[in-house]
Image (tube, rainbow, N blue to C red):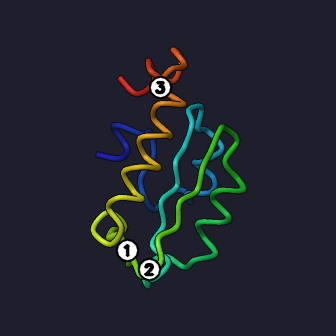
Amino acid sequence: MSKWKAGYFFGEESALNQLAKVQVPVLFIYGEADTFVPTEMVYRLYEACPTEKELLTIPRAGHGTAFQVDRPQYEDVLESFMKKNLSNSSAVSSFI
């Protein structure tokens, strides 16, 4: 599926290398209690992102649980990010 949609297999590339191809705004959301992805990785990805970007870290959230741990903050940041970035017509067309 990844080869068909993104043009590469998971084993072929790193997230850092693929991030160089990004042309839309990116919201990074990271659970500070994630034991699957090292904390340093989200900061490396954030710094490598060539486009408009934001970073939200959620204390006590594990891998993929940020929404469940702090739903109000998650929703506030996501809504703000989308309002700011979806008003740009090129970003909108990339999301559709």
Pinpoint residue 58: horizontal percent, then vertical percent. Answer: 47, 70
User: Circle 3 is placed at which residue position?
Assistant: 86
> In the picture provided, is 4 more to the left or to the right than 7?
left
Pinpoint residue 87: horizontal percent, then vertical percent. Answer: 50, 20
- 5 or 91, which is in the foreground? 91
Pinpoint residue 95: horizontal percent, then vertical percent. Answer: 40, 27
Q: Residue most toward the top? A: 89
> In the picture provided, is 17 more to the left or to the right than 28?
right
Residue at image position (56%, 32%) is 24
- 82 or 93, which is in the foreground? 82
Residue at image position (41%, 52%) is 9
Q: Check disc 2: other Cα within 10 Å, few if <14, some if 14-19, many if 20+.
A: some
Q: Which mark is residue 63?
A: 1
What SS does tag 1 mark?
loop
Mark with earlier residue (1, 2): 2
> Which quarter of the image is occupied by the N terminus?
top left
Marks 1/2: CA–CA distance: 5 Å
In contact (CB < 8 Å): disc 1 and disc 3: no
Asked if residue 80 is positioned above or below residue 40 in the image, the reply reads above
What SS does tag 3 mark?
helix
> In the picture provided, is 72 more to the left or to the right than 45?
left
Residue at image position (66%, 38%) is 51
